[in-house]
Amino acid sequence: MLTWAIVFLIVAIIAGFFGFGGVATAAAGMAKILFYIFILIFLIMLVLSFVGGAAAS
């Protein structure tokens, strides 16, 4: 997930450099959405690891 966010970020930077504003905006938006989804999943897994780790001990 984080890899795709980085890919879209790079596409947005390259598209912005070459003057494709619409493509850059869309790619940056996708990168932002994927990054937030990644952070959400990371936090959920972090909480589950604390809960599961305490129950296993």
Image (cartoon, rainbow, N blue to C red):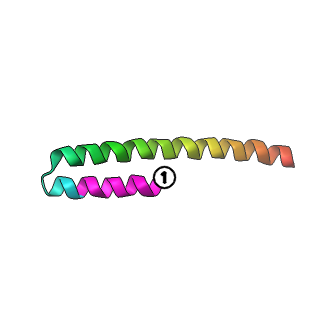
Query: In the image, residue 54 lies at what x, y percent?
Result: 81, 45
Mark 1, residue position: 1
Query: In the image, residue 34 lies at what x, y percent?
Result: 43, 45
27 to the left or right of 16: right
40 to the left or right of 9: right
Say what secondary structure mark 1 lies in. loop
Q: Residue furthest right?
A: 57
Residue 51, located in which quarter of the rendered image?
Answer: top right
- Residue at left offset 24%, top offset 43%: 25
Depth check: 19 or 53 in front? 19
The number of callouts visible is: 1
- Residue at left offset 57%, top offset 44%: 41
Query: In the image, residue 1 lies at what x, y percent?
Result: 48, 52
The answer to whether 48 is drawn above or below residue 12 in the figure is above
Check residue 54 for magenta coloring. Answer: no
| Residue stretch in magenta | 1-13
4 to the left or right of 19: right
Mostly what secondary structure, the magenta segment?
Answer: helix
Query: In the image, residue 21 lies at what x, y percent?
Result: 16, 46
Q: Residue furthest left?
A: 19
Q: Residues within 10 Å of mark 1 (few under 14, many from 20)?
A: some
Check residue 10 for magenta coloring. Answer: yes
- Residue at left offset 65%, top offset 46%: 46
44 to the left or right of 15: right
Given the image, on which type of amino acid does mark 1 rest?
Answer: Met
- Residue at left offset 44%, top offset 58%: 3
